[in-house]
Amino acid sequence: MNYSFRFTGVQDPRVELGASRQWGGFSVREARAGAGLHEGVVFDDHRISFYLCEPTRTDCGTAGLRQSRLSVNGDFDFVPGGCDGFWEDSAPVDLVSMRFAPTLIDEVAEGLGAPGRVSLAPRLGGRDPFISHMVGLLRAELAAPEPASRLCADSVAVALATRLLRDLATPLPSRQTLSKPQLRRIIEHVEASLDADLSLADLAAVAGISVPHLTTLFRRTMGQSVHAYVMERRVCRARDLLLSGRSSVAEAALETGFAHQSHLARWMRRLLGVTPAQLLRI
């Protein structure tokens, strides 16, 4: 949420800032963002906004991506440094905001043997059990009367930066990536066709490039394969339909391109850690 853009500068009156800690190039803060539209401010730091909320309708966008979803506890948005954005939630939400200085990311990348500088791709509505675990540790730290040792904090910061680099890193600057218009067309086509039998040829045609070119450039741009992205969006759309009460499990599976309920259940467990039946009992 863009409250994470406002550790400095003018404070949005609809954002209530909570406990915070900062260790060198890494900082964390709890916050509660009011319902309504929040416009992002460009900062050099990379930012994770981690949702702690009941199912809440969210419209958001950053760096050429746009998403409408039902946000639930454990979702996160990642905004790379230098990018603005907007978020609009239908109800107040609690969040944990983490910020990473570019120098921290560069140092960790160098330690991992990255060939030159790297950039990080944006991610909206991400899910990651490891990041959820790290957030739990950080929330316990924020509740503690005394701050953790620098060594402990550095370990958490490096672990999170390593995860971001593993999942979202793309080479800079000489290797080609998808243009913003190409990426926007692909994302819009995927969102409009989640119930269809999407193919790489279809998406390559939307972008105006060949299939091999698409697979290479999409991974460079988004930090994941086309297939992984499409399955993530299908699972998230199915989750939204189930939590909204508009569809049964069978209907949600068909409306999001899964062959049957079991197919949806396997992917939902893989990406969200719960089956549709377990999700509806939460």
Image (spheres, rainbow, N blue to C red):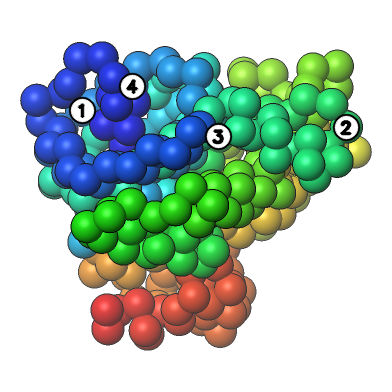
Q: Quick check: 249 left or right of 10?
A: right
x, y (%) of residue 65?
50, 30
Along the viewing direction, whichever of 138 and 220 lies nearer the viewer: 138
- Let me know if residue 148 appears in the view: yes
Q: For residue 252, what is the image quadrant?
A: bottom left
Residue designated by label 2:
115
Q: Distance from label 1 to label 4 (Cα)? A: 10 Å
Residue designated by label 1:
37
Residue designated by label 4:
40
The amino acid beneath tag 3 is Pro
- Let me know if residue 195 appears in the view: no
Q: Is residue 127 above or below residue 27?
A: below
Marks 1 and 3: which is nearer the front? 3
Q: Residues within 10 Å of mark 2 (few under 14, many from 20)?
A: few
Mark earlier in primary sequence (2, 4)? 4
Q: Residues within 10 Å of mark 4 (few under 14, many from 20)?
A: many
Mark earlier in primary sequence (1, 3)? 1
Residue designated by label 3:
122
